[in-house]
């Protein structure tokens, strides 16, 4: 997976424009995040910490602020913000998951980016990005420095280094298509709109988001549902993501099904109709939920309740279906018209409760219900999609 940005700490098994310059061997991908006490500091300076809030102190003034990585309790370094006069941030150092500094950002008096300096593991400057002038200099270990006129120039150079003409390339950025010289070029899009000119440039076009059967277009390959694997185990856990405290029938379901854990999440704070349920032992509230926690709940839950009034939060119901959650709802609450064709969407909460009870009591009910949901929504067949990708890997067009 290749990202056309200058991030220096992208996901595992991925590279970026910066990765191509700062990581020179497999050894660079070894190590662990830097614990804050191991941060190098100038002579006679010291680290001051109040647990999470941590500074560099020169004996008289605070000179830098330490920002920890996402799990702040581990207190490993993500960034160091260096202060100028009056604790104004003048430079920011970025530290990667392997414990070494990969980038330094220099700022002007207004806090605007002036220059990015990229370092290899030996802390040698390997790439300089003059942001306002928009040119870059690559300082290689041998030979002359290489000057790039801008990001597009860097992309062309890096693509030439990492791509092979006989590989199948799946591209998600239409701006890159003219730069790619591949025999088998595939384009992947979230939407199927505005693809007419793109389809002429590629061998196949993939659509990641779900579209009902009547909205699908010929010549496109729809992927939604293909990530589902067979025989997923049922767990008595239900989830709802809401932007409203009005969730039809929730309190009754919580009381009726004490053996189901109900995970109720929101991007913001919650109103009293939800917070009053917190005393229930089978209710778990997540106000201001993070994306990471939201994904965790999706993985662990087998039921998604589309019962909340108001707008849908992002495309959460589509993500739930793709995650092989069984979508339950009412005809009056489901957020998409075509969900009304699902066998798990009912006219009343009582009818829905009877179906959930059956789900708990009959072992083969869950796989049968998932199969019915997949057929009703015309989700992609995993075996067919896998065969398509195997064909691409084998070189057939």
Image: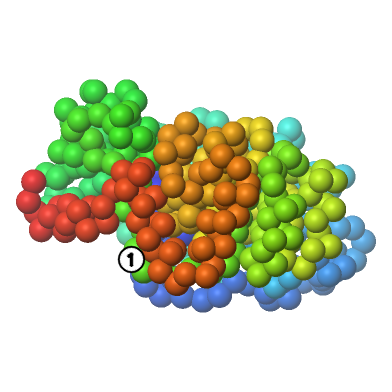
* Residue 356 seen from this side: yes
> Which quadrant of the figure contains the N terminus?
bottom left
Q: Is residue 163 left or right of residue 1?
A: left
Q: Residue at x 51, y 76 (%)?
A: 31
User: x and y percent of residue 169 in the render?
Assistant: 23, 48
Q: Residue 322 vs residue 105: left or right? A: left
Name the spot of residue 155 as percent of width and height, x first: 34, 41
Kindly identify the residue that appears in the image at 25 percent across and 29 percent down: 217
42 in relation to 175, above or below = below
Name which quarter of the figure residue 378 lies in.
Answer: top left
Left or right position of 67 against 158: right
Up-down relation of residue 160 to residue 390 (above or below): above
How crowded pointer 1 is (Cα within 10 Å; few <14, some 14-19, many 20+) is rated as: few
Q: The residue tagged with tag 1: helix, strand or loop?
A: loop
Q: Is residue 108 above or below residue 79?
A: above
Q: Answer yes or no: is residue 124 visible.
A: no
Q: Quadrant of residue 242?
A: top right
Q: On the image, which quarter does residue 13 sit in? A: bottom left
Outermost residue toward the left in this view: 396
Which of 9/197 is in front?
197
Residue located beneath label 1 in the image? 230
User: Height in image: 90 above or below 78?
Assistant: above
How many numbered marks are there?
Answer: 1
In this rendered view, identify the residue nearer to me: 195 or 387: 387
């Amino acid at each position: 997976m290749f990202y056309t940005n200058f991030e220096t700490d992208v996901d595992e098994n991925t590279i970026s424009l910066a990765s191509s310059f700062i990581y020179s061997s497999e050894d660079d991908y070894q190590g662990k995040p830097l614990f804050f006490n191991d941060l190098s500091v100038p002579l006679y300076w010291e680290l001051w910490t109040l647990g999470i809030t941590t500074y560099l102190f020169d004996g008289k003034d605070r000179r830098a602020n330490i920002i920890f990585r996402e799990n702040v309790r581990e207190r490993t370094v993500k960034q160091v913000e260096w202060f100028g006069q009056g604790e104004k941030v003048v430079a920011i150092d970025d530290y990667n998951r392997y414990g070494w500094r990969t980038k330094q950002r220099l700022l002007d008096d207004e806090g605007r980016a002036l220059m990015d300096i990229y370092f290899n593991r030996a802390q040698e400057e390997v790439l300089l990005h003059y942001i306002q002038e928009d040119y870059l200099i690559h300082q290689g270990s041998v030979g002359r420095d290489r000057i790039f006129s801008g990001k597009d120039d860097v992309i062309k150079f890096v693509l030439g280094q990492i791509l092979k003409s006989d590989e199948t390339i799946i591209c998600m950025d239409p701006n890159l298509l003219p730069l790619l010289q591949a025999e088998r070029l595939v384009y992947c899009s979230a939407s199927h709109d505005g693809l007419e000119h793109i389809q002429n440039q590629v061998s196949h076009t993939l659509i990641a988001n779900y579209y009902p059967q009547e909205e699908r277009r010929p010549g496109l390959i729809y992927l939604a549902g293909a990530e589902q694997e067979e025989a997923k185990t049922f767990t008595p856990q239900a989830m709802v993501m809401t932007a409203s405290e009005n969730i039809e029938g929730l309190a009754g379901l919580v009381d009726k099904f004490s053996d189901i854990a109900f995970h109720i999440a929101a991007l913001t704070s919650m109103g009293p109709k939800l917070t009053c349920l917190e005393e229930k032992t089978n209710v778990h509230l997540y106000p201001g939920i993070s994306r990471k926690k939201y994904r965790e709940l999706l993985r662990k839950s087998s039921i998604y309740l589309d019962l909340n009034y108001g707008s849908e939060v992002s495309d959460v119901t589509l993500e739930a279906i793709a995650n092989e959650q069984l979508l339950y709802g009412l005809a009056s609450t489901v957020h998409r018209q075509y969900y009304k064709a699902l066998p798990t969407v009912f006219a009343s909460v009582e009818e829905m409760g009877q179906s959930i009870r059956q789900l708990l009591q009959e072992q083969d009910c869950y796989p049968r219900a998932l199969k019915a949901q997949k057929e009703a929504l015309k989700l992609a067949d995993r075996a067919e999609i896998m065969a398509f990708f195997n064909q691409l890997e084998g070189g057939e067009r």
